[in-house]
Amino acid sequence: MTELNLPVLDLSQLDAGDEAAARFRADLRAATRDVGFFYLTGTGIPSELEHRLHRAARDFFALPEEDKLAIENVKSPHFRGYTRIGGERTKGAVDWREQIDIGPERDAVEGGPAFNRLIGPNLWPEAQPELREIVAEWHSALSGISRRLLRAWALALGAEESYFDDHFGEPSTLIKIVRYPGTNDPLPQQGVGAHKDSGVLTLLWVEPGRGGLQVERDGEWVDAPPVDGAFVVNIGELLEYATNGYLKATNHRVVSPRAPHDRLSIPFFFNPALDTQLPLIELPPELAVHARGVTQDPGNPIHSLYGENALKSRLRAHPDVAAIHHAELIGATASSA
């Protein structure tokens, strides 16, 4: 544990011999059992790619309002595209941020389970054609890191290294490019409200020097400032489910920056196929005795099927999109979310 309030793990230790790799796996297990969050260094992400993505994000939010609204998410039944400031909610309260949501590029699917509505094409800004290529590079790089982490987790939990590879199917990914405007309000403002992620794994890139992320530890909110060259990593509700609560998803939030500053962050969510239900990992006895069971919260049920968990989150976060495209689902699904 460091003065940064979160553990720091070095992914390159997986390539530094058996002892170093075993220590990394033990540290990974401890960090995600005790905290649910950690900093990840040694990922090998080229700084040039990081800088290009940062520049592209800045360029997107600098576009004229009409260019951004041309791809507003209310035009997408798949919850893709641009969300204007104040257009998203956490537990019913307005989040003060703007963003673009980018998922796997797929054709829309007709019929089937309700969560199939999350499958479909992205909305890309015509005024910034380079964004698509940069995001594709970022997606490929972070997918590789995610798979390495999941293989390390599997071994750390007493499963076969291929456990997640075998049960994930075609991953459901999501990239959000987010801008938090500054505020002059003397009281902390909700950039994004307290929540847990609905899937398995999140890798968060934060603009250097821009704080605001807070993680709940022992009932208190602690700051998780950005660390140069590191991602902030956290687990989601589905990994809590798969380990019967041995690992726990953790509440986190973002406090708005003080004007005139703003803040960019780019979370990458790596999750199973929508129709996938991860089987419970058969933990070794020495770990199973510490499994605490899945959190029981009537206001936020954790579904075993990822698609149900994902749809729950999208319907409640974007009620305008839900009302326009999925009105018949609001009562049946959103009420349990």
Image (spheres, rainbow, N blue to C red):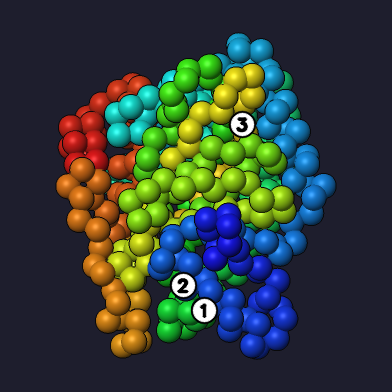
Position of 65 with respect to 89 (left or right) is right
Hey, what amino acid is under mark 1?
Ala
Q: Are marks 1 and 2 in contact (CB under 8 Å)?
A: yes
The residue depicted at 78 percent of the width and 41 percent of the height is 51
Q: Position of residue 126 (x, y in %)?
A: 68, 23
The residue depicted at 53 percent of the width and 25 percent of the height is 98
Looking at the figure, which quarter contains the C terminus?
A: top left
**Residue farthest right in this picture:** 48
Which of the 4 image quarters holds residue 22? bottom right
Q: Which residue is mark 2?
A: 30
Position of 318 with respect to 50 (left or right) is left
Q: Which residue is mark 1?
A: 26
The residue depicted at 49 percent of the width and 58 percent of the height is 37
Which of the 4 image quarters holds residue 145? bottom right
Report crowding for label 1: few under 14, some 14 to 19, many 20 or more residues within 10 A (C-alpha). Answer: some
The residue depicted at 78 percent of the width and 39 percent of the height is 52
Depth check: give the residue in front, 182 or 237. 182
Q: Which residue is mark 3?
A: 263
Q: Position of residue 288 (x, y in %)?
A: 30, 81
